[in-house]
Image (cartoon, rainbow, N blue to C red):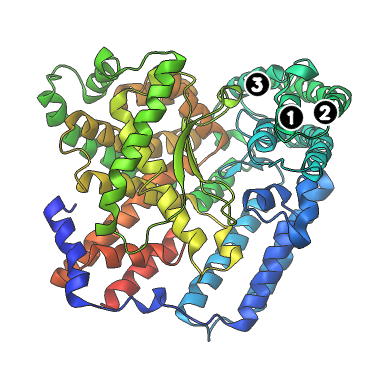
C-alpha cells in the first residue's frame, strides 16, 4: 500500500520522464473484419434486449421500435436467446485472431469470454439473472415484477406522445413477462429448483405490495404525472389504468398463486448444493462473477485470511476512539449505534445524508488529476432510491449515464432504514459508487473511442466491483480520511465486510452453512446489524458467487500495482498504472492480469 507521499511522487514521475502510453492503450486502427463481426453480434444482441437498448440510449433510429418492447422471457424466447448465443460463439471461434493487434486481441478475447460464460450458464435450464446468474427466475431480486416498474418509471423517458404510446406498449408487454416468469417458475420446480422458504416469503411480500388499485400503482401514476408535465393528452392515465386492471393485476395474482404453491413445498436450506446440479452450477456462478479460476475452498481461505488481517488493522484504530472492550465486531457494532454518527429517521435526516454525500463527492474531485490521465466530464450526482422501490433495492448502487449522455451518472442510496447508514460509513460508499469508483471506471469505458459498442455494453463483476473496492483504498491514500479517523474505520469496516462476503458465500453454497449461521458470522465478525446482515445473506442465496467478486477483484488491482511498483522502481507512475488497467475497458480478471504484465514489460 502506497502512502500519500509515494502516491504523489509516482504521479509526478510521468511528467518528468515524458514516457509514451503502453502500446496496448495507444490509438489503434481496428481490424475491419473484427469490427464488422462485432457490429453484427451487437446488433443481434440489442434486438433481443430492448431494456438494455433503452439503458444505453440506443432505442432510436433503426432501433426506435425497441422503445415499445420488452425482452421475450417466454420459454421460446429463452430458447432463442440461447441459440443466438451459441451461433455468436461459433462465429467468434471461426474467426482467426492470430494476426490481431494488441487492442483488438483484448477486445476479441473479452467478447469471446462473455459468450463462453453465457454458454456455461445456458447449460443449466433454470433460473434467471440480476447482477449475475441466479438459480431462481423469480425472487426478491429477480423477475420482471421486481425490475420493470422502476425501469419504466425512471429509465423510459417520456417527452412526446410517441414516448407515451411506447410506455403503454411496454405495459402490455410487462403483463406477458409476468406470465412468462410464472411459467418458468413451474418449469424450474419440475426440475427440483425451488427457492428457500425465506426467499419466497420476501418475494410474496414484494409481489403483494403490487396488488393495489390502478390509481395507486407506480406504473399508472408515473405516466399520468409525466404526460401532465409535458402537456400531453390526459387520456394516458386511463389507458394505463385499464391495462393494469385488465392484464397486469391478474398476471401478478397468478404469480402470487404460484409462489404460494411453491412456498408450501419449500425447504429452509439456503445453498444451491442441495440442487441436483448445484455444485456444478455454483462453480459456473463463481467463474462468471469473479472471472477467476479459483475453487470455493481457495476463496473461503482467502476470505478468512483477509478477515484476520483487516481485523488486526481495525483494532488499534478502535482503541484510539476509546473502544477497547470486546471483539472487533462488537466494537464496530457499538460504534454503529453511537448517536453522534446517526442521522434522524426523518425526511430531513434523509435529505441531510444525500447532501453530505454530494459534498464528499465534490471534495474528492480536485484530487483525481494527480492519479488519472483521464477523468469523465459528465455530470454526476447522488440521489435517494425512490421510496416506492426501496424494499427490493440494494443499499447503494451506481448507474452510468447512457451512451448519448441524455442523463447524468447517478449514485443511489437506499434510505429505507436510516440506521443502515451511520455517518462514518458514507464516505467510502460514495467513493466506491461514485469517484474514483464505478462512475470513473464506467465513464472512461463509455467515452473510450477504442472500445466497440459490444464492449461498452458488457460488464464483469470481478473487474467493476474490484475496481470500486480499490477506489476506496485510493481515497484513503489520497488523504480523504486524514482529518477523519472514524471515517477511516468506516473504510476498513467496508473492506472487512467484503472479505467476510467471500467466507459467507462459499459457506452457504459449498460448505452447507445455514441462513442463520451466515447471519451470525456477519454480526460477530463485522458488527453488521442483524437485519441488514439478513438482507445480505438473502442476496447471496439468490445470487451465488457474486459477493466474492469484490475482494478478489480488489486483490488483482492492488496486487498488480504492488508488483509493478516493485518491478519498475523509480520508473513506476501511478497515472500510467491506472491508464493500463482502465484503458482497455471492463475485462475478465484473467485478462486484466495479462494487461498488467504487459504494462510492466513495456516500461
**Total marks drawn?**
3
Q: Residue furthest front?
A: 231
Image coordinates for residue 390, horizontal then vertical, percent: 55, 24
Q: CA distance from mark 1 to mark 2?
A: 7 Å
Callout in the foreground (3, 2):
2
Q: In this orientation, which residue lies closer to the viewer: 157 or 173?
A: 157
Q: CA distance from mark 3 to mark 1?
A: 29 Å
Label pair 1/2, CB-CB below 8 angstroms: yes
Return the residue at label 3: 206
| Numbered tag placed on residue 154 in the rendering | none
Q: In this orientation, which residue lies closer to the viewer: 450 or 584?
A: 450
- 400 vs 579, left or right, is right
Q: Residue furthest bottom?
A: 99
**On the image, which quarter does residue 73 sit in?**
top right
**On the image, which quarter does residue 97 sit in?**
bottom right
Return the residue at label 1: 228
Above or below, 172 against 28 in this view is: above
- 84 vs 104, left or right, is right
Secondary structure beneath dot 3 equals: helix
Looking at the image, tell me whether mark 3 or mark 1 is earlier in sequence order.
Answer: 3
Image coordinates for residue 148, horizontal then vertical, percent: 69, 35
**On the image, which quarter does residue 441 sit in?**
bottom left
Q: Residue at x 14, y 30 (%)?
A: 317
Image coordinates for residue 253, horizontal then vertical, percent: 80, 20
Q: Residue at x 59, y 33 (%)?
A: 274
- 133 vs 579, left or right, is right
Return the residue at label 2: 234
Looking at the image, tell me whether mark 1 or mark 2 is earlier in sequence order.
Answer: 1
Secondary structure beneath dot 1 equals: helix
Q: In this orientation, which residue lies closer to the viewer: 199 or 466?
A: 466
Looking at the image, tell me whether mark 3 or mark 2 is earlier in sequence order.
Answer: 3
Amino acid at each position: 500500500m502506497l502512502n500519500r507521499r509515494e502516491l504523489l511522487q509516482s504521479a509526478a514521475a510521468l511528467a518528468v520522464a515524458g514516457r509514451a502510453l503502453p502500446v496496448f492503450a495507444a490509438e489503434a486502427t481496428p481490424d475491419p473484419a473484427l469490427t464488422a463481426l462485432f457490429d453484427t453480434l451487437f446488433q443481434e444482441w440489442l434486438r433481443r434486449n430492448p431494456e438494455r437498448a433503452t439503458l444505453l440510449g440506443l432505442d432510436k433510429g433503426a432501433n426506435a421500435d425497441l422503445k415499445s418492447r420488452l425482452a421475450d422471457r417466454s420459454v421460446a424466447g429463452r430458447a432463442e436467446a440461447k441459440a443466438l448465443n451459441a451461433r455468436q460463439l461459433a462465429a467468434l471461434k471461426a474467426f482467426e485472431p492470430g494476426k490481431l493487434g494488441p487492442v483488438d486481441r483484448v477486445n476479441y478475447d473479452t467478447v469471446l469470454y462473455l459468450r463462453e460464460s453465457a454458454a456455461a450458464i445456458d447449460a443449466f435450464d433454470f433460473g434467471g439473472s440480476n447482477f449475475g446468474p441466479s438459480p431462481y427466475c423469480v425472487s426478491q431480486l429477480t423477475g420482471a415484477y421486481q425490475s420493470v416498474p422502476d425501469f419504466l418509471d425512471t429509465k423510459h423517458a417520456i417527452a412526446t406522445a410517441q414516448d407515451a404510446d411506447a410506455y403503454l406498449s411496454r405495459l402490455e408487454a410487462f403483463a406477458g413477462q409476468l406470465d412468462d416468469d410464472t411459467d418458468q417458475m413451474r418449469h424450474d420446480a419440475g426440475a427440483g429448483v425451488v427457492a428457500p422458504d425465506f426467499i419466497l416469503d420476501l418475494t410474496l411480500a414484494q409481489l403483494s405490495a403490487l396488488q393495489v388499485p390502478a390509481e395507486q400503482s407506480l406504473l399508472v401514476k408515473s405516466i399520468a404525472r409525466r404526460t401532465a408535465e409535458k402537456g400531453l393528452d390526459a387520456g394516458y392515465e386511463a389507458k394505463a389504468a385499464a391495462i393494469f386492471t385488465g392484464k397486469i393485476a391478474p398476471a401478478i395474482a397468478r404469480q402470487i398463486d404460484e409462489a404460494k404453491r411453491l412456498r408450501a413445498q419449500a425447504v429452509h436450506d439456503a445453498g444451491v448444493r442441495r440442487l441436483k446440479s448445484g455444485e456444478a452450477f455454483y462453480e459456473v456462478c463463481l467463474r462468471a462473477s469473479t472471472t477467476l479460476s479459483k475453487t470455493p475452498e481457495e476463496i473461503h481461505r482467502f476470505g478468512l485470511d483477509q478477515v484476520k488481517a483487516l481485523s488486526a488493522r481495525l483494532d488499534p484504530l478502535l482503541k484510539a476512539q476509546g473502544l477497547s472492550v470486546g471483539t472487533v465486531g462488537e466494537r464496530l457494532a457499538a460504534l454503529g449505534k453511537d448517536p453522534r454518527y446517526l442521522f434522524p429517521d426523518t425526511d430531513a435526516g434523509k435529505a441531510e445524508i444525500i447532501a453530505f454525500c454530494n459534498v464528499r463527492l465534490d471534495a474528492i474531485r480536485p484530487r483525481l488529476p494527480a492519479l488519472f490521465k483521464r477523468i469523465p466530464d459528465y455530470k454526476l450526482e447522488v440521489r435517494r432510491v425512490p421510496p416506492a422501490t426501496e424494499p427490493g433495492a440494494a443499499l447503494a448502487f451506481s448507474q452510468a449515464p447512457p451512451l448519448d449522455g441524455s442523463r447524468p451518472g447517478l449514485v443511489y442510496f437506499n434510505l429505507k432504514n436510516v440506521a443502515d447508514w451511520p455517518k462514518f460509513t458514507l464516505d467510502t460508499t460514495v467513493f466506491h459508487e461514485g469517484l474514483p469508483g464505478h462512475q470513473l471506471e464506467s465513464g472512461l469505458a463509455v467515452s473510450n473511442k477504442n472500445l466497440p459498442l459490444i464492449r461498452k455494453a458488457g460488464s464483469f463483476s470481478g473487474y467493476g466491483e474490484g475496481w470500486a473496492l480499490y477506489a476506496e483504498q485510493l481515497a484513503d491514500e489520497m488523504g480523504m480520511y486524514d482529518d477523519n479517523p472514524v471515517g477511516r474505520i468506516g473504510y476498513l469496516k467496508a473492506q472487512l465486510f467484503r472479505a467476510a462476503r467471500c467466507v459467507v458465500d462459499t459457506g452457504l453454497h459449498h460448505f452447507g452453512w445455514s441462513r442463520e449461521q451466515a447471519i451470525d458470522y456477519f454480526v460477530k465478525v463485522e458488527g453488521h446489524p442483524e437485519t441488514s446482515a439478513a438482507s445480505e445473506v438473502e442476496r447471496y442465496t439468490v445470487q451465488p458467487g457474486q459477493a466474492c467478486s469484490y475482494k478478489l477483484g480488489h486483490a488483482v488491482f492492488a496486487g498488480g500495482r504492488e508488483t509493478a511498483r516493485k518491478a519498475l522502481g523509480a520508473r513506476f507512475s501511478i497515472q500510467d498504472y491506472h491508464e493500463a488497467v482502465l484503458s482497455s475497458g471492463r475485462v475478465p480478471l484473467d485478462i486484466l492480469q495479462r494487461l498488467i504484465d504487459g504494462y510492466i514489460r513495456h516500461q
